[in-house]
Amino acid sequence: MTSIHVPVLAGELIDLLDPQPGANAIDCTFGGGGHARLIAERIGPLGTLVCIDRDPAAEERFEEFALDAPCDTRFLRIDYSEGLRVLASEGFQADLAYLDLGVSSPQIDAWHRGFSYSYDARLDMRMDTEQELDAHEVVNQWEERRLVEVFRTYGEERYSRQIARAIARRRDARPLETTHDLVEVIKAAVPPAARFGGGHPAKRVFQAIRIAVNDELASLETGLPTAWSLLRDGGRLAAISFHSLEDRRVKRFLVERARGCLCPPELPICVCGHEPEADLLTSRAISPTSGEVAHNPRASSGRLRAARKTDDSGEG
């Protein structure tokens, strides 16, 4: 029986994107298809919804979704940064595009894929199950100093060095094969106080490994400007982030597009002539309501930002 996917910040996303009948839309991260269903209902039979996801399981869900979708649909099974480049090469123009970043609920719930520290499974964490690099290789083959950097940079883990050293010692004796193996090493490596406060002690390390395996931040860095370039004047771009590494990048990108004058502050008048490309639709990130979090605890860390491309931005 197929579980029902609960999209995060769905009402807020729809309000900001304001999809109209006949619009062209891009769902950069189809996942469980929750947001796609809401968009499809609003753009209707004259609209086109292009969905992108590198996960083969998402493609299966899309095929089911497309059977009765009320609009024209298309699916690209590829990383969204690459998929957006494909659309750009085809000259596709969109009225709205959106990203729901990070790991999806269907991926977490597929315990055998190793995304969650709550289930015991082989170390995997691949969003594209056909790619070679997986969590098993990262944990067992990457140098200790590289693990320290991954845990510190992608997980903002305070005990990166201690955890990496513990992993290196353990794998010298025998490889870490499962998520349970990794969790036990992490728990033993951190101070006792860190095991009981601030969430699960493995949370940040699992996040860091997943980001490294799937090169998630590189996709975001290249995907945002490509998505923006695909928007028609007046088009809207929105992104839902689930940790500060994503949210900072989204915020920086949108704020830079909304900037006007780039002249040094000491100049009395503007001489650069630079005009803003965007109107920010969110002055600050929008968080889920307490009611949504109560209904869907996974929504708690969601942060939504959006901007509208100005009518005189000068881009296609």
Image (cartoon, grey):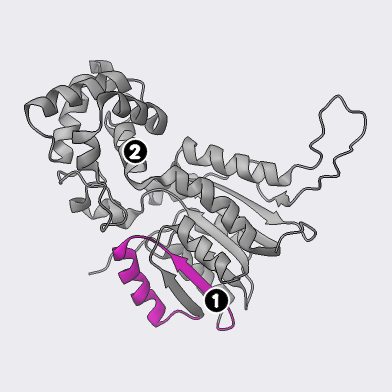
Measuring from the top left, give residue 218's x and y in whole percent. Answer: 46, 44
**Residue 117 found in image quarter:** top left
The crowding category of the residue bearing disc 2, from other C-alpha atoms within 10 Å (few below 14, some 14 to 19, many at least 20), is many
Q: Is residue 266 left or right of residue 243?
A: right
- Secondary element at tag 1: strand
Q: Which residue is mark 2?
A: 207
Q: Is residue 111 above or below residue 138?
A: below
Magenta segment boundaries in residue numbering? 45-70
Q: CA distance from mark 1 to mark 2?
A: 34 Å
Q: Amino acid at mark 2?
A: Gln
Q: Is residue 263 above or below residue 66?
A: above
Name the quadrant of the C terminus. Answer: bottom right
Q: Is residue 111 above or below residue 182?
A: below
Q: Amino acid at mark 1?
A: Thr
**Residue 283 found in image quarter:** top right
**Residue 315 found in image quarter:** bottom right
Q: Is residue 250 left or right of residue 142?
A: right
Q: Is residue 124 left or right of residue 279?
A: left
Q: Which residue is mark 1?
A: 48
Q: Is residue 131 above or below residue 231?
A: above
Measuring from the top left, give residue 140's x and y in whole percent. Answer: 18, 34
Measuring from the top left, give residue 88's x and y in whole percent. Answer: 57, 65
Q: Earlier in the sequence, mark 1 or mark 2?
A: 1
Instruction: Kindly identify the residue that appears in the image at 36 percent across and 53 percent down.
Output: 104
Instruction: Kindly identify the residue that appears in the image at 59 percent across and 52 percent down.
Output: 225
**Looking at the image, can residue 31 be seen?**
yes
Query: Are the residues tagged 1 and 2 within 8 Å (C-beta)?
Result: no
- Is 9 part of what is drawn in magenta? no
